[in-house]
Image: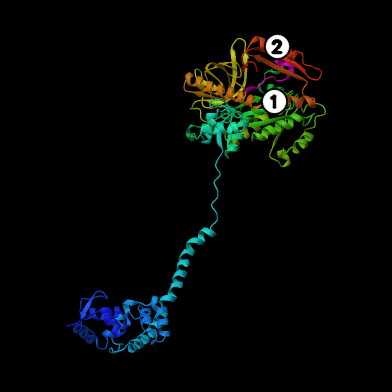
Amino acid sequence: MAKKRVHEIAKERGISSKEVLAVLQRAGLDVKAAASSVDEQDIARAFASGSDGSSNGADAAPAEPDAPEDGDRAAGSAPPAPPARSGEERPRRAQPQRPSRPTRGVPPRDGGGGGRRRRVVIDSQASRRPQGPPPPQQPPRRGRGRRRRTPWVEPDLTAPPEPVKEEPPVPIKSGATVKEVAESLGLGSPEVIKKLMELGEMATLTQTLSEEAILTLAGEFDKKVDIVHAADEVEEEPEYDDPEDQLIERPPVVTVMGHVDHGKTSLLDAIRETEVAAGEAGGITQHIGAYQVHHDDHTITFLDTPGHQAFTAMRARGAQVTDIAVIVVAADDGVMPQTVEAIDHAKAADVPIMVAINKIDKEGADPNRVRGELAQQELTPADWGGDTEFVDVSAKTKEGLDDLLENIVTLAELEELRSNPNVEASGTVIESRLDPGRGPVVSILVQRGTLKVGDALVAGAHWGRVRAMQDYRGERVTEARPGDPVEVLGFDGVPEAGERVRVVENERKARQEAADRANRLKTEALARRQGVRISLEDVFARAQKGDLQELNLVVKADVAGSLEALADEIAKLPQQEITVNVVRDGVGGITESDV
């Protein structure tokens, strides 16, 4: 029996090869391509078995994909509009749905016209079906996507911005070397040296930098720094959290301040019944002294700060260690410049202020006038409705002294002054001097702990071991408790008044800490000298302004001949406007001792 290829069958029946393949495959024939051969008997059986639905459904499914080919074959007989619609709707056709409608077809007929009419009907129906849900659903899906993102984006847009945490300044010790500055700033040493070279400063790793250079470097690298001086590290007494059962009441430390010759020392003499003023030059206190008095089972420690204006700095140190400030004002003289300074120091130290109006026994004394003047300094008397206690006293007749002490004790009780005596001692240097027979003598006010003979001490750049102690009466004591002033022997030098004093474990540690602090102070001094450099331009500018009348030179050369020649040339310089002095000359480099 003769065989026909699939594409020949499609051409005869006016349908596409895909439609023929679909019909043959549904009939159980193993046909896979348009070039496959099929017996005519199998062809007739396959198309006959489809009868009403199979061939028609097969035609409907692939009608649109092959519409252009069919249009090419029958361009003359087929209307142009149906293939065009078929071509437009072809991308939106859902192919798997076509085999599910087997009943809509018509039995196949000879001729291509019937096939085209069937395609027209099917295509018209298909053109209406794709206009359903699929295309309109795409925009809502995109809209829903935007709505899902909106709640996540909105908090970022409406939420308040997080506060920017400002980095704290980096602490750098005064007189630090290039390497130390680089480590503190978190930078490499080569980077810092390169920046210094760009700024016109040649430096090595071990060279100390002035404070101005450190601040300039920090600004170049957008860093904030805090210059820490050696004197600042031990300036204030640290806070301690001592158990309540170990705290005891300590004597209040009272600072007596006021104008010169208003009777401060005479008032203290009258209180402690001694004649210290008689042994002082001109009756003016030369050093800060500390004394203790007793009143009704209470002990009071007095600091006698000089009222002379030249000792303003010493008076400020006295106000830093005091608990109560007593301002002495003469009733016949009133408020003076040093009186105002004493009030300012007491306010700066944040200590309670009490006023003692002295010399009320003198002719012309007017305590009420003094009260009015002090009220202008914001010290309103308590009997005028203020909060400052005023006591009228006379150092000469000892009138009002008991009232003064009673008010001090009452004010001290309100302050609740307590300290722990069972720890290592610490305090403040009140006064220090070099005694020809005993060496350095340091007056210390113990503020915490108990100071004992044999303790190792550190006070600034000095250290020592307590060899002996004396109280304010000159009697030897073996220990000093909080609030007690004592004179200590055994320091290696004379520390400055106001230095913090503390006990350390042993002499070795005391010596090491003092040496470290001494080196720090020396380095800081060197850095300050490096920071203040005068160029020749500065010298000329000052000379033109008339600010420079004398120029001191240190002349150094590599050989003696060059030194002599240079000295001769300097001596020949005209000195009508500026006097040039060679204060030192020699062979070699300029050293620190030369400067």
**Bounds of the magenta span?**
278-293
Quadrant in the picture for the N terminus: bottom left
Residue 5 sits in quarter:
bottom left
x, y percent for residue 261: 75, 24
Residue 337 sits in quarter:
top right
In the image, 342 versus 514, the foreground residue is 514
Q: Give the alpha-carbon distance from disc 1 to disc 2, as whole Å.
A: 23 Å
In the rendering, which numbered label is found on residue 272?
A: none
- Under circle 2, the secondary element is helix
In the image, 62 versus 112, the foreground residue is 112
**Label 1: few (<14), some or many (≥20) within 10 Å?**
few
Task: Name the residue tied to disc 1.
Answer: 535
Eyeballing the image, is 125 above or below 271?
A: below
x, y percent for residue 408: 64, 31
For the point 74% across and 15% down, which residue is it?
581
Quadrant in the picture for the C terminus: top right
Task: Name the residue tied to disc 2.
Answer: 565
The reply to whether residue 101 is in sight is no
Amino acid type assigned to the residue bearing label 1 in the image: Ser
Nearer to us: label 1 or label 2: 2
Eyeballing the image, is 165 above or below 356?
A: below
**Label 2: few (<14), some or many (≥20) within 10 Å?**
few
- Say whether marks 1 and 2 touch (CB < 8 Å): no
The reply to whether residue 317 is in sight is yes
